[in-house]
Amino acid sequence: MTAFDVRPITEEERRSTFDLLRRALHVRPVTDDVWARIRESWPAAHKFGAFEGGSPIGIVSSYDTEIAVPGGRILPVAAVEGVGVRADRTRRGALSAMMAAQLADFAARGLPLAVLHASEPTIYGRFGYGSAALGKTVRVERPAARLHERVAAGGDVRLLTPEEAVKEIPGLYRRIGLHRPGMIGRPAQWWPISHDQQAGPDGGHLVAVHSGPDGDDGFVVYATISRRSFEAPDRGAALDVHDLHAAGPEARAALWRYLLSVDLVSEVRARHRPVDEPLALMLTDHRHAATVAVEDDLWLRPVDVEAALAGRTYGTAGPVVLAVTDRQLPANTGHYEAGPDGARRTGAAADLALDVDTLGMLYLGQWSATTLAEAGRVEVRDEAALARADELFTTTAAPWCGTHF
Ligand SMILES: CC(=O)SCCNC(=O)CCNC(=O)[C@H](O)C(C)(C)COP(=O)(O)OP(=O)(O)OC[C@H]1O[C@@H](n2cnc3c(N)ncnc32)[C@H](O)[C@@H]1OP(=O)(O)O
């Protein structure tokens, strides 16, 4: 077996590492044209490669952004993306070595948190990431589904041209704001690959914007897929929602009402929606909207446990002391008190013990301490502390990311 080195990539290694990633994800390498359009989205900064004889065999990437945490504060976060190892060099420790370098870099730069979306759920727990926010896949039957009359869904919905979409949606996303735990900022480098390629002139997606009393306050990016065939000449198209954000329930309802009004569509489908989005309840017949899957969406890793715990707020129960174990960043291993007055390191005896990936699961409020204990992920040292931890950590709104990266 040959050895490899792990180090930050250079400017000259941007395209070869991007193509390596695409191959790992079963996508063809980029053409010169496409690379010219998206190269700014793949800067050398914050990328670690594994190299064998000077050639890249693995890549991990991230960018710095912000995340909303329970209580409404916005914390710095590293968004980990672009993870891949060449197919003939997997299972030799390349990812583990790159992840160790990346985590050490996050810790050295004082980042409290890191997040990612996992291609497979078995990979990232070992590196301290826990499944922190779920997303649901919904399928709505058209034309049967209708919003019931008590749903407030005023305002106007208008379609943008692709040029307008590229120009206007970044500012609108910023104005809508990070209003749920788990929502993250979209820096300039996010948009060319993740939005402009779909919504811009060559992408084929459509973009609709909702305007309420205070101006534009919601948008949806979607694609329609014709499903007519010789055997089924009248079959309606599928409408796939790619990205939908709204500042409030009225704008959200108006966007859904618009989607359900598009003619010649027999099914509206959306992945990774908030688990508590009340779409079915907004319909005259809730059976016209089915939740067909609930999946892990955002994974979260506390990088600086004390800063992460101190960055969010807690419910009103008495404090609990957590014993946290972190094998990759051992400086985090220790006892932490969390309660209505905040969180800090402590020398007190622990009520509950957990690994740092489980703390990631608890952090945004997706899972209760009781559920995690029942699943064998939290060791209960004081039974009464479990109910207090439930009160302290759970949130009213389900956490949700809503951004693919
Ligand atoms: C955040 C994102 O970007 S998600 C996208 C992730 N990328 C992909 O899925 C692309 C296709 N897959 C790959 O490129 C590679 O298989 C990777 C990156 C997932 C793993 O890289 P590798 O270099 O093989 O991982 P490495 O050898 O360090 O394995 C570390 C451990 O994870 C386990 N592991 C790694 N990948 C997988 C997997 N896909 N399924 C199950 N276990 C896995 C290994 O068995 C090993 O376990 P051990 O520590 O108990 O021995």
Image: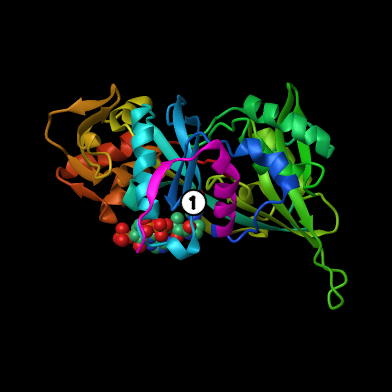
Residue 84 visible in rendering: yes
Residue 147 visible in rendering: no
Circle 1 SS class: strand
Q: Is 273 positioned to the left or the right of 128 in the image? A: right
**Which quadrant holds the N terminus?**
bottom left
Task: Give the quarter of the image for residue 102.
Answer: top left
The magenta stretch is 1-23
Q: Position of residue 66 (x, y in %)?
A: 50, 29
Q: Position of residue 345 (x, y in %)?
A: 21, 27
The residue at 53%/45% (across/down) is 276
Q: Is 322 positioned to the left or the right of 139 in the image? A: left
Residue identifier under label 1? 56
**Magenta stretch: includes residue 264:** no
**Which quadrant holds the C terminus?**
top right
**Residue sitting farthest toward the front:** 53
> Considering depth in this image, is 97 or 229 the residue closer to the camera?
97
**Magenta stretch: includes residue 3:** yes
The residue at 45%/32% (across/down) is 77
Q: Position of residue 142 (x, y in %)?
A: 76, 58
> Considering depth in this image, is 29 or 83 the residue closer to the camera?
29
Q: Position of residue 167 (x, y in %)?
A: 76, 30
The kind of residue on which mark 1 rests is: Pro
**Residue sitting farthest toward the bottom:** 231
The residue at 55%/43% (across/down) is 13
> Considering depth in this image, is 382 or 311 the residue closer to the camera?
311
Q: Is 293 positioned to the left or the right of 346 in the image? A: right
Mark 1 beta carbon near ligand 1 (under 8 Å): no
How crowded pointer 1 is (Cα within 10 Å; few <14, some 14-19, many 20+) is rated as many
The residue at 73%/47% (across/down) is 32
